[in-house]
Amino acid sequence: MMLLSATYPDSITFVLCAIVVVGGGLGVVLSNNPVRAALNLVMTLFGVAVLFVELSADFLAVVQVIIYAGAIVVLFLFVIMLLGVDKQEKLGSEPLILQRVIAIVVGLAFLGMIIGYGWGNFNSHGSYSVIGVASGGDSGIVELAKATFSYYLLPFEVTSVLLIIAIIGAVVLIARSGPGEDEVKEDISAEIKTDGPKEGHENDVSVSEDKVDEVRSVDFTVGEEQIV
Amino acid sequence: MSVDLSYYLILAAVLFTIGLIGLLVRRNVLVMLMCVELMLNASNLTFVAFASKLKDVGGQADVFFVLVVAAAEVVVGLAIIVSIYRKRLGATADDLSSLKG
């Protein structure tokens, strides 16, 4: 199992990671349970992280695991659990009949185009080490930091602005507004307080979940009224 | 010698295509966002592969910015999904047909 000039450990690592990455990707697309799709996404992300190590980008592999698997996928799972959409979904039902066929044909055409075009040009002739030398010795963290805080300083600052915009946008989208909804919320929280935990914590949790459902249904009607 | 650049690029192209087809086929908005993450990871893999091939940390620095944009995109996307779900009690693309003619 030699991939051109690669050594056996490198080749075996690459093949295993490729299987994990592609299998995880197919799992995301084909699984009918959103929780299972998220866990398949974690598998793909770990495979990509190992490939980063193989490409001597150790720091990015760590960042990949911490941010993607540790933050983004947890956020996905949190929203799945919050909305309660973790039920089976029928993959067979498709309102638009031709849409699935056309999507697969377009996707495969894209793959064929990108591989067919690049077949003769895979070893592209870019200039070497423009931003900084990626040395193999100390995994390149020093060079990466120098590049980020000198050459990429302006984009780095812009990303901080982007993150603040994203946070504010998320808060604005999630926050409940309107006086009527606030009154409803206060009423229900008062009810929860009067009910109180009587027989331990489990009872308390079930009561509050019922109230959450009530809040959701009330919101639904209020939203409809606003639309009408 | 490590594995040739071509194999990394082919793997990234395959991963990107899986994400693309998933984005077009699936109806669940959460799964569609996960497919976008797959496509972003494919582009990250391409960046790092070229950074290793050309011995240039610029490719690795770019992956940082892709990570930040991906995090921001997921936060805003999930916020939109939650606010849609509050109004319509559904999280599939078919629930968002208000604008159809």
Image (tube, grey):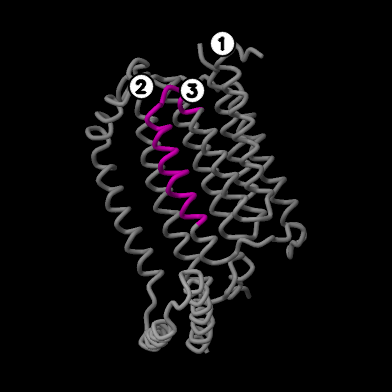
Q: Which residue is mark 1?
A: A7
Q: Residues within 10 Å of mark 3 (few under 14, many from 20)?
A: some
- Quadrant location of residue A189? bottom left
Chain to which the residue tagged by mark 2 belongs: A
Task: Specify start and end residues of the magenta stretch as a single range.
Answer: A51-77
| Residue at figure coordinates x 62%, y 73% from the top left | B100
The quadrant in which the C terminus of chain B is found is bottom right
Q: Which residue is mark 3?
A: A54
Circle on res. A139: 2
Say whether disc 1 or disc 2 marks the residue closer to the N-terminus: 1
Q: Nearer the viewer, residue A6 or A156?
A: A6
Rounded to the nearest angstrom, the CA distance separating label 1 from label 2 is 20 Å
Q: Position of residue A209 (x, y in %)?
A: 51, 74
Query: Which secondary structure dominates the residues rendered in magenta?
Result: helix
A100 sits left or right of A119 in the view = right
| Residue at figure coordinates x 54%, y 54% from the top left | B33
B87 sits left or right of A137 in the view = right
Mark 3 lies on a secondary structure that is helix
- Quadrant location of residue A130? top left
The amino acid type, in three-letter code, at marker 1 is Thr
Q: Residues within 10 Å of mark 2 (few under 14, many from 20)?
A: some
Whether A115 is drawn above or below B4: the answer is below
The amino acid type, in three-letter code, at marker 2 is Ser
Q: Is residue A52 rendered magenta in the image? A: yes
Whether B80 is drawn above or below B13: the answer is below
Chain to which the residue tagged by mark 3 belongs: A
Rounded to the nearest angstrom, the CA distance separating label 3 from label 2 is 11 Å
